Image (spheres, rainbow, N blue to C red):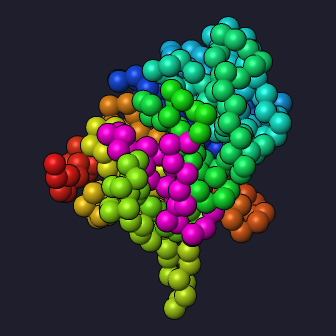
Amino acid sequence: MAEVRLQHPPLDAISQIRFAPIAGSGLLLVSSWDAHVRLYDAASNRLMGMKKHNKAILDCTFVQDTSRFLSVGLDARLVACDFQTGQEFVIGHHDAAIRCVEFHQPTMQVFTGSWDRTLRAWDPRQAQRPVKHVSLGTKVFCMDTCNDKVVVGGADRNIHIYDIRNMAKPVDRRECSLKHQLRSIKVSPDQTAYAAGSVEGRVALEYMDAQENLRSRYAFKCHRTKDGAEEVIHPVNALAFNPKHGTFATGGSDGVVCIWDGYAKKRLWKTDPFGTSISALSFSADGSQMAIGVSYTFDDGEKYPCPTNELIIRAVTDKEMEPKVQKEG
């Protein structure tokens, strides 16, 4: 299928890419270690806006409409910005770098997960003081939300699941079936499961319900290459579910994107390798486009010259993305 490379990609490692959560929109939000957040129109291949911050940005997300966004990073600030007016508003701070941010549409809250070992919820209209403050006891490495839950992957390799309506204690705190550091986590569109990826070239599909998880969870190897007789294991840096079909994509440091049918436990297809690691992935709200952040993730230390950063938009068809076997029930 057709691939388009966006003009004017970030100058340093791409930390996050997100399509606007509006059907038919081609707007793409991109954060980078070059301390900028950029807004692209994927349909016209134009850079629409750019906002500079103090330090590297580790995550970003749209708020309600596509003119405003949230960003977090090494300066430990949760910042709301408006591309049209250029205004910047600090909603709050953590005590160390903020790794993850999610805007929760059902409650209009913002959730942040930090290396200060806390999860915090914010009301964007009431700055500086979080409405909820949860001590996790471990650094946050990845996070996602769904209608009523926040799911956090920690440095302790545990999955911390909180009910947004009552965050006094977790609904569940379970050891992930992956035995190495977590890099990515995403909740499935039906909100019954989540996929998690690790540095050891594995993905786990686990279930929200504790009993179902004991019965049905599984993990599989992926993003592994051969170097002669030796197997080279690559981290799984990025995950994204297709919102229409429920299949999901993984991006690895092997530079490959793989598409999986999680319920059938099958790989549907994979791309040819790109020039360097896949650092971020996102599907458009209608599931017809996949954005791929190609950016060296420093798994092998510094490289000179550093591989080129690329933002690639790939059209995907229903035939490519639909599951081979429908989930029973």
Q: Is residue 277 left or right of residue 95?
A: left
Residue drawn at x 44%, y 71% as measured from the top left: 221
Q: Quadrant of residue 30?
A: top right
- Percent from the top left, x then y, of residue 6? 53, 37
Q: Nearer the viewer, residue 158 or 127?
A: 158
Residue 37 appears in the rendering: no
Q: Is residue 180 magenta?
A: yes
Q: Quadrant of residue 302?
A: bottom right
Q: Is residue 226 left or right of residue 140?
A: left
- Percent from the top left, x then y, of residue 97? 78, 40
- Percent from the top left, x then y, of residue 104? 51, 25
Residue reaching furthest front?
168
Residue 89 appears in the rendering: yes
The magenta segment: 170-197
Q: Is residue 164 left or right of residue 95?
A: left
Residue drawn at x 38%, y 62% as measured from the top left: 214
Count of marks placed on residues: 0
Residue drawn at x 68%, y 18% as measured from the top left: 81
Q: Nearer the viewer, residue 178 or 34?
A: 178
Q: Is residue 63 above or below residue 214?
A: above
Q: Nearer the viewer, residue 257 or 72?
A: 72
Q: Is residue 227 above or below residue 194?
A: below
Q: Is residue 233 above or below residue 69?
A: below
Residue drawn at x 73%, y 14% as measured from the top left: 127
- Percent from the top left, x then y, of residue 109? 57, 21
Residue reaching furthest bottom?
229
